[in-house]
């Protein structure tokens, strides 16, 4: 323990971030090189694909505007439950459990925390009937399934350098260049339960070693929330089988030549629309697959 936790700063950076918020695993043998986006025909023809420019325009939505009013808050009931389990099985004492619950409540009441995040939804599956009916052919309209090269979604600088040659390529090597995260949405609490239990146990042991006078649980609890709130959802959403492209809007405002709140091809949007959407531009070579889905084959309402 002493060899790992050299000081608070190293502990935060080396353990909290890299362990709790890992990158999309490109070395996973089950990883797909293509992700699929289900959308309607009109959106594809008028907003996404620009054949004259040989470019795609993908719109990420601010996570606070999702139809699910619990978006970003599904993780809280689970964390309350796991904290209580750790007390009940003797992993932590009652005072430590009380501290965890108090810090979690503070996080839950911070309503503005999610406003910086923008999301675009994909699936690993190219032929999902649920997604066809509820997204591609929603309201009985014709739909489209787009297959996009996975690496293009995260390697946005090289993708855009042809359209923004003066800035994009140079800025790709800056330390603060925005990173787009790909995350498979988790619907099964068992997938993270053991890890969180172990993390709480390690933090409890660490706290006892260094003394309570120099230790705060605020950062630990906030990190647990931040790590999972963007891609953990209740199990009744599991039919969506969602993989998310997640982008920090606060950061990418510094790079309007790569990510933009205003469309490159359409008039300047209204102020409220600027806050609602983030536009990502890709070369059309990123488009691996296009399938047009006729509305009559979908059992849409």
Image: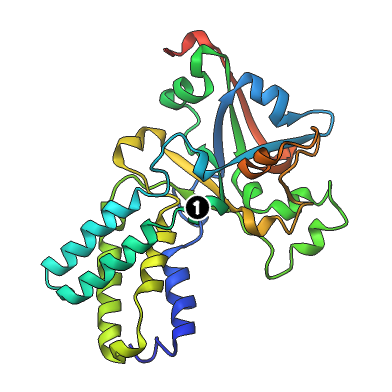
- Residue for point 15% across, 69% down: 87
Q: Residue furthest right?
A: 166
Q: Is residue 257 left or right of residue 130?
A: right
Coloring scheme used: rainbow
Is 280 rendered above or below residue 41?
below
* Residue drawn at (62%, 38%) of the image: 148
Residue 299, located in which quarter of the rendered image? top left
21 in relation to 135, above or below: below
The answer to whether 177 is drawn above or below residue 208 in the figure is: above
**Residue at point 29%, 87% (across, down):** 212
Image quarter in which the C terminus is found: top left
Residue 60 placement, left or right of 168: left
Q: Position of residue 236 (x, y in %)?
A: 30, 36
> Residue 44 location in percent, x, y?
66, 25
Taking the spot 44% from the left edge, 14% from the top edge, the residue there is 300
**Taking 98 as reference, is 136 left or right?**
right
Q: Looking at this rendering, what residue extends furthest in the top direction? A: 296
Residue located beneath label 1 in the image = 114
């Amino acid at each position: 323990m002493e060899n790992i936790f050299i000081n608070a700063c190293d502990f935060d950076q080396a353990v909290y971030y890299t362990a709790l918020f890992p990158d999309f695993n490109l070395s996973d043998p089950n990883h797909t090189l293509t992700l699929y986006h289900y959308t309607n025909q009109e959106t594809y023809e008028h907003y996404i694909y620009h054949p004259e420019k040989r470019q795609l325009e993908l719109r990420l939505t601010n996570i606070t505007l999702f139809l699910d009013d619990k978006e970003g808050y599904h993780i809280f009931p689970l964390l309350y439950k796991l904290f209580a389990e750790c007390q009940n099985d003797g992993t932590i004492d009652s005072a430590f459990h009380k501290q965890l619950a108090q810090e979690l409540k503070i996080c839950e009441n911070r309503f503005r925390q999610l406003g910086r995040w923008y999301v675009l939804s994909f699936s690993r599956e190219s032929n999902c009937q649920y997604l066809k009916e509820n997204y591609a052919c929603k309201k009985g309209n014709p739909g489209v399934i787009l297959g996009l090269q996975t690496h293009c979604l995260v390697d946005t600088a090289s993708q855009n350098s042809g359209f923004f040659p003066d800035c994009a390529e140079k800025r790709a090597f800056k330390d603060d260049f925005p990173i787009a995260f790909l995350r498979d949405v988790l619907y099964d609490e068992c997938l993270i339960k053991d890890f969180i239990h172990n993390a709480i146990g390690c933090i409890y042991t660490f706290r006892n070693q260094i003394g309570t006078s120099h230790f705060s649980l605020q950062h630990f609890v906030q990190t647990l929330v931040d790590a999972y709130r963007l891609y953990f959802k209740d199990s009744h959403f599991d039919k969506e089988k969602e993989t998310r492209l997640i982008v920090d809007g606060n950061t990418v405002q510094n790079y309007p030549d790569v990510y933009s709140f205003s469309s490159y091809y359409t008039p300047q949007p209204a102020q409220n629309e600027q806050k609602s959407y983030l536009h990502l531009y890709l070369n059309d070579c990123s488009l691996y697959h296009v399938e047009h889905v006729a509305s009559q084959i979908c059992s849409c309402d």
